[in-house]
Amino acid sequence: MSLWTIEADQPTRELASQLTVSNGLIGIKDLAEIPGLQAGPLTDTVVYVNGFYDYEQIHYGEAQFGFPQRNQMMIPLPAPTRFELWLDDVPVDLNQGKILAEHYQLSMQTGQFQHTLTWEERSTGHQIEIVLTRITSLKTAALLTQRIQVRALNFDGGKLRIVSGLHVRGMVQPKTFDPRLAGYDTTDILAHQKITPFSVTMRGTTFTASHSRQKLSTITHYDQPGRWLKDGNWMSTFDLTRQPVAMTKTVWHMLGKVVLDTTITSELTRPFAEIAAAQTAALTDFWQTSDIEITGDDESQRGIRFSQFGLLQALGIHGGQQGIAAKGLTGSGYGGHYFWDTEIYEAPFFYWNHPELARRLLMVRYKQLAHAEAYAKSLGLTGALFPWRTINGEESSAYFPASTAAIHIDADVAYLVIRYYQITHDDDFMQKYGAELLLATSRFYLGYGNFDPHKGFVLNTVTGPDEYTALVDNNAYTNFLVQFELRYLTQHFELSDLQRFGVTPSEWEDFRAAADQMYFEIHGNLIAQDDSFLSKRRIDLKQIPRDHFPLLMHYHPLVLYRLQVLKQADLLLAMVLLPEQFTQAQVQTNYDYYEPITTHDSSLSPAIYAIAAARLGEAAGAIKFFKHTVNTDLQNLQGNTADGLHLAAMGGSWITFAWGLMGLTVDDEHATLHPVLPQTWTRCTFKLRYRNQVYAVTVTPTQLTVTGGSTANVTIDQARRLITLTP
């Protein structure tokens, strides 16, 4: 098993997702660059640009006040990676020959996708090797480059003709782009594309979204002489020998109209080798801080690297203003929407390794704050309510019981603000943006909740993380996270700090009172997931046929909502996020109660139970859930990897390792690690960036060491296997 590559010899729809190359702005998904040589199943051939979206009207059977009126959808465009080849005027396809060998590979060290084929012409026996290499630049996010190399293997010479273009209908070979695979019909957007010629090797194209009227422009450059054809393709002819013929196609992407300047021209005309070297350098720098080295478990080693690499590809290192879609840029699942997955599952990797990127994620939310305030106002509430699913900041979900009612989204954003600050002490962010985010979301909760004379402060009619339980009173996860936010706000700020936002003494006291009087239903060490949960009928999941999972595909919500059954971690997630608030006995009691009724139908779930199991010392359960998480997409464990990778599981892989197996926690005063190695692991090393210092941690079954950073502020208790980092 290669620990740095994902490889295969046969194309599948799942492999197309796994081998997608992206850089936070552009995502290219294509295993069939030469359609005539596609022998396997139909796979998606598509390009996604983060932030390029269209609208569609939401049609309700019974629309009511305040329902969102339109849905945003990330637009799948036909990939500009298509090639057609002719050898001495004979088409290079499966009608005129056969594939002798084929191999796919994605390197996590170089960031290059490579597809290698050996094709033999039937009539002459001539064999050629074709190598296609693709990069979405991490250094220059707008840049996609693809190189094709062809060489003769068993003959001395011939003529090679290359035609290059988009994967669209109406070309010579059968189409490989099916809009239905991507969930969006591109017919209109293609019909109204505008072409801007610049030279014989360079031209621009502008696509306009049908309803949002957003524009996306591309500029395409070829590094070899050729000519543009009337059908929009580009063609060139080469003398083919045993030395490879090489041609590079580079495409620049920008939101807005086509603008060609000297900077773009310079980037487009850079040699492939230079772009590849810059990509390798960017990844070398990334892995220098991010890599986790595991000895004794190759499967986990590759899986955790694939997860970290996927997070990097989804966000990129550019200065853009886009968030992380639920599937990143690997598929159209969930319409390209951003969810709470970002704050709770994906951001921790960044704020512990690349805090400048975590800040960028926070700024995405801050720049959409006006939308969140308008949404709260439309519901007759104060403050701000962030959308459950969105691209541009507007709520895009038509099913309010599992979206608008999931008001914990505000506390999730606040949680990221707080943890980011505890780890970085980025005073500039907190003063300019963080305080306002905490205040706006806290104001929403004061307006949404109320003080009950018998219970205290309550948040009724909400939906927590578990999607099989909706519209309940006092979801414990929501209440714990809101209490954490309100306490942080009132304990770390003075009223005078926030008077610029119009905070009054009365409002300030209400914040304190809501935190102090937050209601929870507690029975000894057992905490009720909500006020009604423990009164519902408990079911035995072992009695449900395996082909009835996931349950939401086989049972009406009103059936699921009336049962003690969970799709994913709920209360346990609060215990994982706020470990300082719960005793070991509480965690054990609630783990034992809720895990048997959790289906893990959601890819967000196994990571949380892995962390809880690790903290309880249940090594077998921890490594079982950890392996499930890191292999979610490598083994298609959810059954839908073809629709795109599960970015929350990728983030979950890192928090499972760091928070669970390594026991990482943080508060205002220090960070601590309490690592326990799985049985087969003999050694692991990793790094953390804490208060602008990088610490390298090595863990073996008998020894803990920390180097780098301010080692004078490191305390290691070998007997208790505890590491404390103090700023």
Image: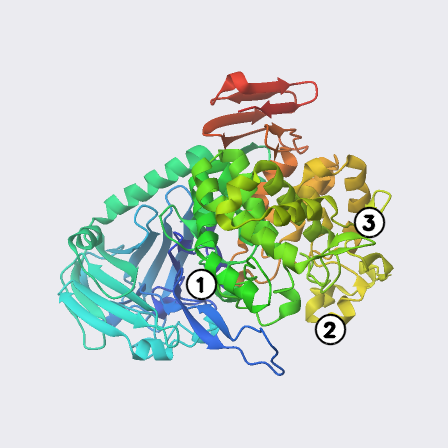
Q: Which residue is mark 2?
A: 556
Where is residue 165? Give x, y as percent: 27, 68
Quick one: 230 or 308, which is closer to the camera? 308
Q: Which mark is residue 616?
A: none
Instruction: Determine the secondary structure under disc 2.
Output: loop
In the image: residue 243, left or right of residue 128: left
Q: Identity of the amino acid at label 1?
A: Asn
Where is residue 309? Give x, y as percent: 46, 45
Within-10-Å neighbours for mark 2: few <14, some 14–19, many 20+: few
Where is residue 388? Give x, y as percent: 57, 61
Above or below, comparing residue 285 to residue 274 in the picture:
above
> Residue visible at 60% across and 76% down?
65
Which of disc 1 and disc 3 is earlier in sequence?
Answer: 1
Which of disc 1 and disc 2 is earlier in sequence?
Answer: 1
Above or below, comparing residue 448 to residue 267 in the picture:
below
Within-10-Å neighbours for mark 1: few <14, some 14–19, many 20+: many
Q: Identity of the amino acid at label 3?
A: Tyr
> Residue visible at 44% across and 73% down?
55
State the image quarter where residue 614 is shown. top right
State the image quarter where residue 170 is shown. bottom left
Within-10-Å neighbours for mark 3: few <14, some 14–19, many 20+: few
**Residue at the outermost front position:** 505
Q: CA distance from mark 2 to mark 3?
A: 24 Å
Q: Which residue is mark 1?
A: 392
In the image: residue 604, left or right of residue 131: right
Q: Which mark is residue 593?
A: 3
Q: Identity of the amino acid at label 2?
A: His
Above or below, comparing residue 95 to residue 567 in the picture:
below
Above or below, comparing residue 181 to residue 662 in the picture:
below
Q: Is residue 145 visible?
A: yes
